[in-house]
Image (cartoon, rainbow, N blue to C red):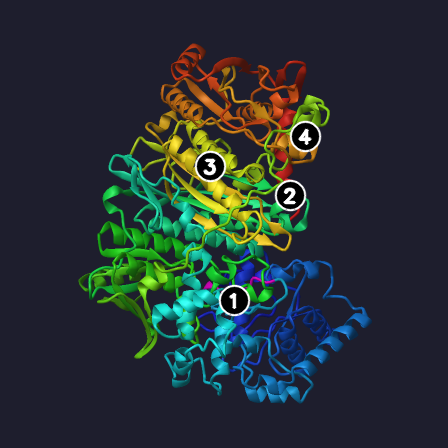
Amino acid sequence: MEKLGFRPRDLTNLALFDRDHRARLLVVDEAIRVDHGEAFGLAAVLQKGCSDRGSRAAVIPATKGSNENRVAQRRLAAEMNRAHTRTLGALAASGRDGLTVWEQRSDCGVFRGLLDKAREGAWLETDRPAHEAAIAAIAEAEKAAPVTAFKRLQHDVTGLTVADLDDLSGQGGATTGHGDRGATGWGRWGGGDGLHGSSLALDDTCASDSVGQLLQRHAVDAHTGTPDRRERGPTADASARVGQRVNPVSEPQLHRQLGLRDDEYTQIVALLGRDPNHFELAVFSLLWSEHCGYKHSKAILRRFPTTGPAVLQGPGENAGVVDVGDGLGVAFKVESHNHPSAVEPFQGAATGVGGILRDIFAMGARPIAILDSLRFGDPATERTRRLLDGAVRGIGHYGNCVGVANIGGEVRFDAGYEQSCLVNAMGIGVLKASDLKSATAAGIGNLVVLFGARTGRDGIGGASVLASQDIDAGGDEKRPTVQIGDPYMGKRLIETSLELVRDDVLVGLQDLGAAGLASSASEMASRGPVGVRLDLAKVPLREDDMEAFEIMISESQERMLACVEPRRLAEVEALCARWELECSVIGEVVEGDHLICTMGDTVVGDIPVAALVDDCPRYTLDPQRPDRLATEPLAIDELPAEPDATTALTSLLGAPNIASKAAIFQQYDQIVGGGTVIRPGADAGVVRLPGSKRAIAAALDGSGRRTWLDPRRGGRQAVAEAARNVACAGGRPLAITNCLNFGNPERGETPYMFVESVEGMAEACEALQAPVVSGNVSLYNEHSGGPIPPSPIVGCVGLIEDAACAIGAAPQSGATIVLLGDAQPSVDGSEYQAYVFGSVAGRIPDVDLEAEAHLIDVLVEAAAQGITHAAHDAAEGGLAVAAAEMAIAGRVGIEIELPELATRDDITLFGEPGGGLVLVAVNDADAMLDLATRHGVPAQIVGTAGGERIHVSTGAAVASLALAEASAIHAATLPELIGAA
């Protein structure tokens, strides 16, 4: 059982597995408790039992007792989508042999979308009127859509044929639901694929009409009969369906339901010179999605500087690469996995980590570090706690298992992320500069080789249906399935890929992520530029009944695509065999410029590569400045009365956005690989470069609240803070990666927020000489309540010439504390304003980018010369919180008297500056002051470290706490949140 991904104690009476770990019959008659990743192994096995040939089974949540089961099944069915209602109602009424009953408990983790109802007891009630109402609802649904209306549909995943439909209708039941899905497996329970991947749907009500369902329905509507889809290869009927031309008159809704506009469909017809078939339309819908095609953002992204003396590879490849000396390069990138994590946080976050690591080693770099930036809603809500718990466990699960250290990141809470959380993962890897690999297909006659995991139905349509639309836009039919990660397979994939790169076996290497083969093959061909011919019948499958378009756009994890010279194929096959990875030649590089796809001898798609990659529509945003944006900061007389400073400091130290995140990062392996120098908790993480005395510092930062008040200033501040944090650790900023998380670009404030944020970020990158070498845009982070706060997340990587000079935030007893910078703190947009005053208003201060560049110089040189041994910038909570955090980190008291930097004492203590205010613990105060003076950076001695109290004062305000008390308050908040999940 352990091999299946869950523990024996989690199952009761689960029987009859074959050697492939695929269930032939499943009966679960008692309660099942499943947590996190174990849930997915169970879901995969359950689903396989339902869809297996010869089975007449269904997975139906139920309560104990045969008399209650049928009522509970019907009660639950009435809560679901109407189409699924008919299937479940019919099966519940049929009493057929082999009906699988799975007892759904309120704490079970498989059907996350139904948990709200489950926890309320909505589907476990025994109230007879409610049950009778549910049964009546089923009867009404059956009358509205009699069984004869569904005879044209494929047999559903329960194995029911058209004859079975007639049989069931005689017992008072009708079925569509799963039949609508056909064998694509894109409904609530997805396409189970045994050990390595079930497909949990991303809806809250058990219904889903995604890419596969839509194509399947339209294809089946055009062709009668129910061919046996379990046979591999293109049956005559299947080939006819795949090749069926879409008629824009008779099927006007299909392209729209796939996320394509009418004018985009017209453009596709013009590019092809004909109507696309279903296969081609599926590919276009993915490659022309916002997630893959950057339709609304690409023109704006050109504003970023992308070149510099250290840049070896800029945007356009899987990751950016910078030169760090000694013949080494560092590859890094940040990407989002927001939408999947909002629905299934464990697997959404885990596969986000897996995906960013594949981007890194696709460049030929060995992954050495991970960082993550997380955004969730109100921490008091059950949803936030569940998402936080699942995402943290998912990140730790994948990173720990694959053996890559997590060295930093951030977590923020804001009600604006309640329905649309953010999970951004940053990966860093090191490579020999001479081993830098491109994702290119080249050389006519060279082979296209797929290696890694088998291909299943998980994630089909994710890039277009999920990541390129509002999370609740268009209802549940727009929500596809979550990918399921396998970190142990991922580890083997890393080692195989890097050995192939080291031995110079490959022409090009590309990971399979969003849009699967469709995207990877198209991008590799475009970089050639060459043509590519793929035989999809040669792709190793987890489910033998997959259609061509499903194989093409599947987002199954842990797969790589390589271009290989025929003479080197044996080496690739031998190495894959040694690492127990499947390896298949699925195509070749051909003359011309088309992507040609076949199933055996049957051509299922023929598309010009340029049409997919270069001719994606580009849209111009219409940024309109929102009237709500302030042009001036709040006046002093608009602020609440100044609170007691000690009370305010106590409150802020326990605020979720400021409190210690140790409860989170202690779940991550921070030192695996042996290179970690500075662990999470400091301003930046630091990891040593293998075989070198050098190290890199990395930070990941952003503030949606501040950007919401002024997007251009917020963009500048995000870049400046990331660079400043790297400098606090002693690193010279080299380059930037970013993840731009915004709402719907076609409405509301989002166009203005996006454009202005990018402009501000670009200005800061230019001023700080930190080019953007990689990144990601995540739009449509929006729901019925509106968009998320505009959230540009910035990752910065910097070089430390000597790892021994890296510094953290912990001062030594007796150290002198020096304040660098003279930026004016402000209450506007601060954590103090939000958490203590209970509002967010005003206009955030701007950052002086020239002064920021000088401050970075001072911080880097001071660390390199051994003048400083700790540094911490004033961020959330201002200078008072920064001083307290340094004391807590160093386990030593601190006494500081601050100059009057603002018009009120509490703002000096707790306000947040636009630019840098940094507290440094120094070994030689005179040397520190002299260095700052030479660079034109204001500096003054403000206190010392020592004793057992935290004492911060300015003017008449004094905040004073015992170190032990402050440490306890700071440490208590997050464990309570996670423990209550």
Q: Residues within 10 Å of mark 4 (few under 14, many from 20)?
A: some
Can residue 104 be seen in this snapshot? yes
Q: Are marks 3 and 1 in contact (CB under 8 Å)?
A: no
**Magenta segment:** 196-203
Q: Which residue position holds label 2?
A: 977
Q: Earlier in the sequence, mark 3 or mark 1?
A: 1
Q: Residue at x 51, y 23 (%)?
A: 917
Amino acid type indicated by mark 3: Gly
| Up-down relation of residue 464 to residue 332 (above or below) | below
Can residue 403 be seen in this snapshot? no
Q: Residues within 10 Å of mark 3 (few under 14, many from 20)?
A: many
Q: Residue 714 location, x and y as percent?
A: 52, 36
Q: Residue 400 location, x and y as percent?
A: 46, 47
Q: Residue 599 location, x and y as percent?
A: 34, 76
Secondary structure under tag 3 reads: helix
Spatial CA span between label 4 and label 3: 32 Å
Amino acid type indicated by mark 4: Ser
Amino acid type indicated by mark 2: Leu
* Residue placed furthest toward the left: 567
Looking at the picture, tell me which residue is in the foreground, 60 or 335.
335
Q: Are marks 1 and 4 in contact (CB under 8 Å)?
A: no
Q: Earlier in the sequence, mark 1 or mark 4?
A: 1
Spatial CA span between label 2 and label 1: 30 Å
Q: Which residue position holds label 4?
A: 651
Q: Which residue position holds label 1?
A: 44
Q: Residues within 10 Å of mark 2 (few under 14, many from 20)?
A: many
Secondary structure under tag 1 reads: helix
Looking at the picture, tell me which residue is in the foreground, 506 or 488.
506
